[in-house]
């Protein structure tokens, strides 16, 4: 799968920018999230490194013949009907697994949004794991895990710093009008 993923990225014109995360557990932010193709690019990127990054997938997709496929692709089942307990479910996943690189889109949607979600911050602090600023830049066709960010106890200040990092990096989404990295930043 590693060489097939490298070949597919090459055919599609993508460059991989950094090696995978060295720690056994982490959260990798996936920004900008403007298309379902973002998953495909990030999946191929991590597989091209011989690794698997996990993503949250609604629990109902783990039934029947689709279940083993979703698990093999790194799916982590979450019951989204339970609201805030999604965060608790993910903290428990980090506690029970030896290796888990969880990709999370802080935008929470593929549509334009001014408010990014800070659930990743709560999870990272509770599980005592690092956060990386992953990206897929459709303008330059570059994909990477980005820099590690040191979180503070102030999620809003950290979100502002994270959004500024993406704004300064100049990443472009597949649908650029759907990405607002810092329009509300001063």
Image (cartoon, grey):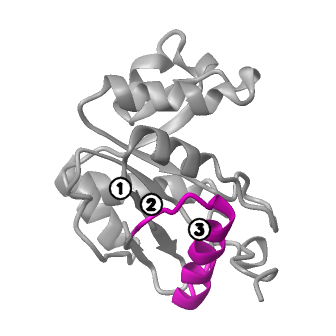
Task: Provide the residue designation for mark 2.
Answer: 41
The spot of residue 158 in percent (x, y) is 59, 68
Asked which secondary structure carries label 2, the reply is: helix
View extreme (top): residue: 64
The answer to whether 144 appears left or right of 24 in the picture is right
Task: Provide the residue designation for mark 3.
Answer: 158
Q: Which range is magenta?
A: 149-172
Asked which secondary structure carries label 3, the reply is: helix
The spot of residue 68 in percent (x, y) is 39, 19
Q: Are marks 3 and 2 in contact (CB under 8 Å)?
A: no
Task: Provide the residue designation for mark 1.
Answer: 44
| Residue at x 48% of width, y 62% of height | 151
The dominant secondary structure in magenta is helix
Disc 2 crowd rating (10 Å Cα; few below 14, some 14-19, many 20+) is many
C-alpha separation, residue under disc 1 versus residue under disc 3: 29 Å
Q: Earlier in the sequence, mark 3 or mark 2?
A: 2
In reply to whether residue 154 is colored magenta, the answer given is yes
In the displayed structure, 77 sits above or below 112; it is above
Camera-side residue of 140 and 96: 96
Occupied quadrant, residue 34: bottom right
Camera-side residue of 155 and 135: 155
């Amino acid at each position: 799968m590693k060489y097939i993923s490298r070949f597919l990225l090459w055919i599609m014109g993508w460059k991989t920018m950094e090696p995978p995360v060295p720690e056994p557990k982490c959260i990798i932010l996936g920004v900008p999230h403007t298309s379902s193709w973002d998953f495909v690019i990030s999946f191929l990127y991590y597989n091209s490194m011989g690794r698997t990054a996990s993503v949250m997938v609604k629990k109902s997709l783990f039934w029947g013949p689709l279940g083993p496929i979703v698990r093999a692709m790194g799916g982590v089942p979450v019951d989204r009907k339970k609201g805030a307990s999604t965060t608790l479910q993910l903290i428990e996943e980090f506690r029970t697994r030896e290796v888990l690189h969880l990709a999370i889109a802080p935008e929470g949607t593929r549509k334009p949004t001014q408010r990014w979600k800070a659930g990743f911050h709560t999870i990272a602090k509770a599980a005592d794991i690092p956060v990386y600023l992953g990206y897929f830049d459709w303008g330059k066709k570059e994909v990477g895990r980005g820099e590690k960010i040191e979180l503070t106890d102030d999620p809003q200040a950290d979100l502002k710093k994270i959004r500024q990092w993406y704004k300064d990096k100049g990443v472009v989404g597949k649908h650029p009008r759907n990405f607002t990295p810092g329009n509300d930043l001063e």
